[in-house]
Amino acid sequence: MDQYRNVRDILDASRRELSKRIIGQKDMINGLLTALVAGGHVLLEGVPGLAKTRAVKSLAELSGLSFKRIQFTPDLLPADLTGTLIWDQGKSVFSVRKGPLFANLVLADEINRAPAKVQSALLEAMEEYQVTIGEESYPLPNPFFVLATQNPIDHEGTYALPEAELDRFLLKLLITYPSPEEEAAILNLDPWQGEGRSRYDTSMDFHLDYSMIETLRKEAELVRCDEQIQKYIVQVVTATRPNEESRKSHDDMYRYISFGASPRASLALYRCAKITALFEGRSFVTPEDVKAAALPVMRHRIVLSYEAEADGIDADGVISRILAFVPVP
């Protein structure tokens, strides 16, 4: 495993630096690092006060990437994201004023508070890595990540994200409450340092520069995924799609699914399973790597029926049942 020694050092240092700012939340930290290596967008969902915004800002500082934060509100306009044309009276021409999307790492805070017109402005950016202003298209910086947060309990003044936008997020991470021990550690940090400062705002001793990210990506590409594991990935994803045959064998479960995951989910699961194996220090993918990546990759890509809501069944419950009956190679 000598070839992974450098990778292990990079990962350990990254986790250590993020843990200075974020107590606990290991799944969130691993998910953010996974997305950074995979080059995908992330949707973070959790109640207020669970350090979602702080985690994204800390990731930006760790990576040294250019960072912009957009606070989504109901009165936000698409041009507030992409930019607009400004008339230069002296030169008698229109000039482009680029918006905050032109950054490596964009925090879309409370993304579900903006209406559909603003959400649509993100679709081109998240998929094509460009935005159109006037008649011209402008490439976004490389790399480009959207890390969005949303509150699952406050629905007043919010708008449900369209499925086309949800499908463009590589992962959806559910942020949970810390354990009592972790919360006690948060108290012991004594965040009141005067002048509005906090011990959370300590400088980082390690920075994950872009060359290190490229190293992790190249190593992830080298992780082997056997043909049987690839078939298993496809079977897991296709098992989310209701059809006549599946309804006959698992009718009780499929009444909870209106629409299953797209082929984009298969690509995401394949990529994230390889990165999971890399993070575990292995050069090959196992079925357990696929299972570990399945929930964050697919929970936002399955459209549940009204029966699921009525019976208190969520996407994680459906995916867990699918993983239980799909044969493991």
Image (cartoon, helix red, strand yellow):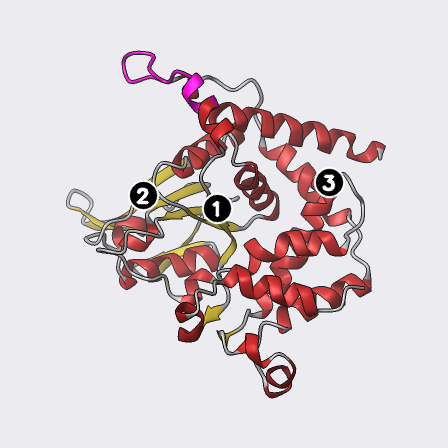
Q: Give the range drawn in magenta.
A: 185-197
Q: Picture coordinates of residue 28 (x, y %)?
A: 52, 41
Examine the rendered structure and indicate whether residue 177 appears above or below residue 78. Answer: above
Examine the rendered structure and indicate whether residue 110 appears above or below residue 127. Answer: above
Quadrant of residue 253 within the rendered picture: bottom right
Q: Picture coordinates of residue 86 (x, y %)?
A: 21, 48
Q: Is mark 3 on a helix, strand or loop?
A: loop
Q: Residue 280 carries which label?
A: 3
* Residue situated in front as seen by the camera: 257 or 232: 257
Calculate the distance from the C-alpha at mark 2 to the C-alpha at mark 1: 13 Å
Report the side of 186 relative to 192 (left or right): right
Examine the rendered structure and indicate whether residue 220 appears above or below residue 300. Answer: above
* Residue situated in front as seen by the camera: 5 or 130: 5
Q: Which mark is residue 145?
A: 1
Looking at the image, which residue is at 40% across and 48% down? 148
- Which residue corresponds to mark 2? 70
Q: Do the residues labelled 3 and 1 touch (CB within 8 Å)?
A: no
Q: Which of marks 2 and 3 is nearer the N terminus?
A: 2
* Residue situated in front as seen by the camera: 123 or 130: 123
Examine the rendered structure and indicate whether residue 191 appears above or below residue 259. Answer: above
**Residue 66 in sight from this viewpoint:** no
Report the side of 131 relative to 283 (left or right): left
- Give the residue type that dot 2 points to: Ile
Q: Which of marks 2 and 1 is nearer the N terminus?
A: 2
